């Protein structure tokens, strides 16, 4: 790995010249130009068998969580109603579970928002983000627009590059971006969606660079959703996918976008994250041969990834050992990185006693207590009102403490239980289930998919969808989408 570039800050003691107080990279690297060239010159021989296999798993997983949300998420109907009110249901693009009657940008918005609505979509730990939901949503819509011109190898390539751009940017933003209140899933995801669309359309580097530059003014996603468990988060990747179509269309029409949008003084990396050791060499090295996105993990539980180690192990330390009441426990201590404590472990009322689904998904207290008492396999059922208000869960969350530990990285964690009978158990959890170091089996990928899709379409059709994705090179995107509503 090349050495990390340092950054320098030029400050002249005054605010008269805003440029002088901005962060500058010590060595200029033309990130925007390099990325645009990578997208413009993408080749299907980048797709090794391993890359293909992983992409198929990600697409199967995306379809499962999106179809489930289309029929079960409480935010689906209000979002759909808004899109219809804006004229977004007057086209011929497909929304999973909802039909083929939407304009492209709104189809992409809905497919991405639905894919994120259960917080069950794939996750890239180094960037603390969800890359697939924007890349796949944009890819399906753009490929459908191209019809028979959309070669499925090209579709897989476009999705891979969308993932890769999002993941690489997310890694350089780091957790530090969250301290500025930005959600990496959408701020980085819009650029991945732009890349996916541009690969499918075989656009030239200059147009791609302009599209990136225009997307830089639309990169958004506020973490303020944590205040009240709002649905902003579910919409973040939807907004990113929608605005990616806008940025590409504008660039194709000749609209000039900002130059150096990634590396510039006021560019994306400087503006959206205070991280001091951004490595622009690593960011741009070995494009097409070293795939960061292959470290993307599938989620076994519909909750913030930061809680997954606790969910997986709480049931082993509780219910599976016969401890099924809050009175069986003296205390539980949960340790995770300081940055992650601020997201899921703050000792505030809507974390300790959440009253809605989003707050509960972002509560290490609730997710741990629920798994400890009732097991880890109850899916979104655990967010129903009776479970949120369950007196045993509430009594147990009052006995849980969350601690920050700087030695813990990414989604690692540690859990200590002191039982009322005097016993103590402690477990170190370096990687939650689904990470490449603690991976899903293919059987687990399929089991998750069928658990999500069978209630929507029943097993025979779910099997048809799974088998079609596994042999996607022999089908068209129109054929695939025709099975998804």
Image: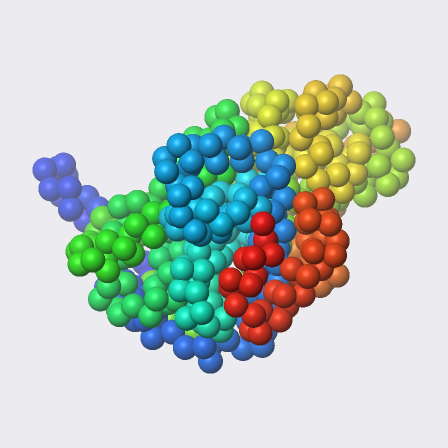
Q: Residue furthest left?
A: 16
**Residue at figure coordinates x 34%, y 52% from the top left:** 245
Q: Position of residue 475 (x, y in %)?
A: 56, 70
Along the horizontal axis of the image, is 180 left or right of 355?
A: left
Query: 483 or 433: nearer the eye?
Result: 483
Along the horizontal axis of the image, is 260 left or right of 381?
A: left
Picture quadrant of residue 205: bottom left
Query: 442 or 244: nearer the eye?
Result: 244
Q: Position of residue 186 (x, y in %)?
A: 41, 46
Relative to 309, is 445 above or below?
below
Scheme of colours in the image:
rainbow
**Residue at figure coordinates x 68%, y 28% from the top left:** 384
For the question of whether residue 453 can be seen, the reply is yes
Relative to 150, is 179 above or below?
above
Q: How many marks?
A: 0
**Residue at figure coordinates x 75%, y 39% from the top left:** 378
Q: Position of residue 229 (x, y in %)?
A: 52, 28
Relative to 210, is 95 above or below?
above
Query: 172 or 32: nearer the eye?
Result: 32
Relative to 398, is 218 above or below?
below
For the question of whether residue 221 can be seen, the reply is no
**Residue at figure coordinates x 58%, y 20% from the top left:** 349
Picture quadrant of residue 360: top right
Along the horizontal axis of the image, is 350 left or right of 398?
A: left
Q: Position of residue 456 (x, y in %)?
A: 68, 45
Quadrant housing the N terminus? bottom left
């Amino acid at each position: 790995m090349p050495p990390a570039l340092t950054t320098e800050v030029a400050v002249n003691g005054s605010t008269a010249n805003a440029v002088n107080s901005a962060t500058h990279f010590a060595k200029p690297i033309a990130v925007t130009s390099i990325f645009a060239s990578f997208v413009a010159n993408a080749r299907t021989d980048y797709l090794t068998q391993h890359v293909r296999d992983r992409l198929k798993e990600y697409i199967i997983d995306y379809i499962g969580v999106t179809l489930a949300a289309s029929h079960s998420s409480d935010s689906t109907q209000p979002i759909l109603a808004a899109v219809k009110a804006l004229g977004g249901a007057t086209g011929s693009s497909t929304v999973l579970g909802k039909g083929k009657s939407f304009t492209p940008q709104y189809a992409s918005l809905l497919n991405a928002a639905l894919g994120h609505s259960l917080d069950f979509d794939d996750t890239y730990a180094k960037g603390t983000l969800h890359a697939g939901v924007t890349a796949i949503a944009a890819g399906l819509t753009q490929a459908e627009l191209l019809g028979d011109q959309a070669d499925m190898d090209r579709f897989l390539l476009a999705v891979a590059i969308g993932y890769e751009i999002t993941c690489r940017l997310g890694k350089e933003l780091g957790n530090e971006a969250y301290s500025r209140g930005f959600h990496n899933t959408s701020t980085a995801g819009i650029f991945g969606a732009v890349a996916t669309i541009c690969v499918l359309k075989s656009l030239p580097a200059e147009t791609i660079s302009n599209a990136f530059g225009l997307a830089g003014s639309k990169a958004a996603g506020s973490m303020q959703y944590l205040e009240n468990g709002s649905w902003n988060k579910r919409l973040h990747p939807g907004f990113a996918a929608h605005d990616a179509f806008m940025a590409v269309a504008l660039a194709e029409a000749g609209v000039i976008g900002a130059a150096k949008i990634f590396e510039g003084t006021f560019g994306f990396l400087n503006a959206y994250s205070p991280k001091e050791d951004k490595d622009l060499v690593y960011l741009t090295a070995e494009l097409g041969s070293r795939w960061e996105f292959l470290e993307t993990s599938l989620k076994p539980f519909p909750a913030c990834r930061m809680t997954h180690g606790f969910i997986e192990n709480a049931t082993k330390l509780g219910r599976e050992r016969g401890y099924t009441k809050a009175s069986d426990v003296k205390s539980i201590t949960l340790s995770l990185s300081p940055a992650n404590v601020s997201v899921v472990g703050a000792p505030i009322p809507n974390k300790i006693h959440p009253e809605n689904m989003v707050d509960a998904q972002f509560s290490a207290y609730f997710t741990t207590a629920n798994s400890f008492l009732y097991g880890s396999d109850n899916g979104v059922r655990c967010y129903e009102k009776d479970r949120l208000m369950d007196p045993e869960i509430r009594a147990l969350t009052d006995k849980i403490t969350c601690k920050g530990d700087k030695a813990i990285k990414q989604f690692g964690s540690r859990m200590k239980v002191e039982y009322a009978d005097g016993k103590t158990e402690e477990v170190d959890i370096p990687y939650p289930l689904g990470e490449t170091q603690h991976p899903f089996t293919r059987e687990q990928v399929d089991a998750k998919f069928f658990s999500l899709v069978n209630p929507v379409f029943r097993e025979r059709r779910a099997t048809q969808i799974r088998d079609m994705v596994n042999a996607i090179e022999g089908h068209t995107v129109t054929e695939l989408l025709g099975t998804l509503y």
